Image (cartoon, rainbow, N blue to C red):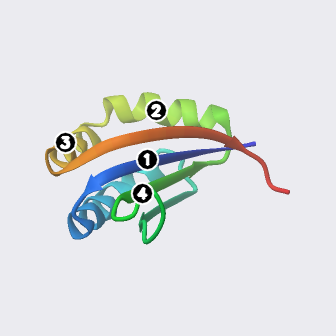
Amino acid sequence: MTVTVVSRLKGNHEDGLRIGRQIAPILKNHGATSVRFGYCHSGEYTGQLFGVTIYPDGATYGRAMQALLEDTQYRQILGEALKIVELQDRSVIITQDL
């Protein structure tokens, strides 16, 4: 079963996209199979940003989380990101293909 991490953020779309483009290769280097970024156009979260990262399984997700804690480049980009976007919510969802 895959692990899907969904982060909801408040901030400027262009700033979020720039950060996403910097951080995606790092996440993929640590095992993510997909990294996506989007802007909510309707509903309760209109105007907010969403980042979605998918890992192939729980073991890969666990290794990635440990590695990211030790990754200096990741921590630097994340620190810069948190100055210009505000994390609203994060969900970790165990999913399976149907």
In this rendering, the answer to whether 91 lies above or below 37 is: above
Q: Residue at x 43, y 47 (%)?
A: 7
In this rendering, the answer to whether 22 lies above or below 41 is: above
Identify the amino acid type marked 1: Ser
- CA distance separating discs 3 and 4: 28 Å
- CA distance separating discs 2 and 4: 27 Å
Q: Which residue is mark 3?
A: 76
Q: Which residue is mark 2?
A: 65
Give the number of the disc on residue 45. 4
Identify the amino acid type marked 4: Tyr
The foreground one among 13 and 53 is 13
The foreground one among 91 and 27 is 91
- CA distance separating discs 2 and 3: 15 Å
* First in residue order: circle 2 vs circle 3: 2
Question: Element under label 4?
Answer: loop
Expressed as whole percent of the image width and height from the top left, the position of residue 90 reads 45, 39
The foreground one among 53 and 7 is 7
Location of residue 15 (image quadrant): bottom left
Split into 4 quadrants, where in the image is the N terminus?
Answer: top right
